[in-house]
Image: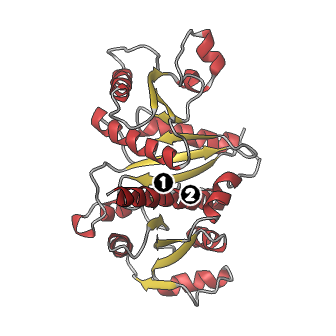
Amino acid sequence: MLSTIPPECPAFLLDRAKALPRVVTAVVNPVNLLSLSGAKRACDEGLIEPVLVGDQGRIRALADVLDWDLHDLRIQHVSEEVQCAEAACMLAGSGTAQALMKGHLHTDVLLRAVLKREVGLRSASRLSHVFHMTLPGSDKALSITDAVINVQPTIVDKIHIARNAIELMHALGYEKPRMAVLSGTEEVVASMPSSKDAAELAKLATIGALGDACVEGPLAFDNAVSLEAARIKGIGGEVAGNADILLVPNLEAGNFLFKQMVYFMSATAAGLVLGARVPIILTSRADPLEARLASCALASIFIDYRRQLRNQLQAAS
C-alpha cells in the first residue's frame, strides 16, 4: 500500500526561493548524514548560507563522505546537544542568523532553547508548526497545522495556531486563504469539544481576530477537501471542498494525516515552526532531502515576506 512514486521538491517553491537572497541559517547539530545532506543540498541550490553548529570533528568527517568542501563556511564547535541548541539560538537572537534548521537532535531540546528569555527569540505568539503539503506533479498545496508542537491545544492556543498559518499563506501569495477547522462532525456537539472550538474560531474570524482569511468550521475532513462530499451533505460556504489550510483538533490527528499523505501519496511535507522571531526549519526525522529542501525554500519566502512588511512600515512612518 505504500506509494513508490519518488517525492519532489515543488518547483514553484524552489524557483521562487532561488530568486531571493540566501538565508543565513544556523543548522543545529548536523552530525548525521541526513541532516548534513539537507544543509548541503539547500546550500548548493542557493537557498541558505549555513552556519554549522555542532561537533566540528564529526561534521568535517561527514562532509568528507558527502564531498562537501567546508572551507568557506562557518562552523561553531559545540559538542553537546543542549549547548548546540542554545548556541544556535543565540546566533538567531543576536541577528547573526535569520533562521534555524533542526539537525540531529530532539525537537523539544531545540524548542526549549528557543523559548529561553535571554535568547531573545520569543514573541507575543505561541509557537506552532505548519506542514505545507504538495504532491508530485502538482502545484496545489494544502497546509496542515499543528501536527508537531501543540498536543492538545486550547481555544486560545488554536487562535495562535490559526494566525501563524494564515500569515504563512499570505507570504505564499494567498490574499485570503481558506481555513477549515476540522472536527469529526459538521455540527456543534457538546460531547465533541473540537466542534465547539471550531465554531468559536469561525466566529472570531468574522470579526477579523485571526487575520485576513475565510475560516469555517466545524468541518469533517471529507467536507473540507471534497466539493462532492460537501454538495451531497448540503454544506455551502467558501471553504468546504476548497480548503487551503486544515486546522486539526490535536497533534495526533495532524500527525496521522500528514504521514498518510507522505506514505500513501508521496507527498512532500515542508515544515516550519512559526511564532518566534525567526522561522525554524523543522521536518520529521525520517523525511527525505526533498522535504528538507522544500522547508528551506518555505523559510526563505516567509523571511522575504516579513522583510517587505518591515520595509513598508518604515516607509509609512
Can you give x and y, in whole percent of width and height, for residue 77 in the image? 42, 85
Residue designated by label 2: 295
| Quadrant, the N terminus | top right
Judge by depth and name the residue closer to the eye, 73 or 104: 73
Question: Residue at (32%, 74%) from the top-left corner?
Answer: 94
- What color scheme is it? secondary structure
Residue designated by label 1: 272
Q: Name the amino acid type tagged 2.
A: Ser
Instruction: Give the left or right position of residue 114, taking residue 71 as reference.
Output: left
Proximity of marks 1 and 2: CB atoms separated by less than 8 Å: yes
Instruction: Give the left or right position of residue 81, taking residue 234 as reference.
Output: left
Q: Name the amino acid type tagged 1.
A: Leu
| Quadrant, the C terminus | bottom left
Judge by depth and name the residue closer to the eye, 2 or 37: 37
Residue that sits furthest to the front in the current view:
316
Mark closest to the chain's N terminus, 1 or 2: 1
Residue that sits furthest to the left in the current view:
117
Can you give x and y, in whole percent of width and height, for residue 20 in the image? 58, 65
Instruction: Give the left or right position of residue 33, taking residue 252 as reference.
Output: right
Can you give x and y, in whole percent of width and height, for residue 210 in the image? 36, 36
**Could you say whether the residue bearing mark 1 is in a helix, strand or loop?**
strand
Judge by depth and name the residue closer to the eye, 11 or 187: 11
In the rendered view, would you say 258 is above or below 105? above
- Give residue 97's quadrant in the image: bottom left
The CA distance from mark 1 to mark 2 is 7 Å
Residue 22 visible? yes
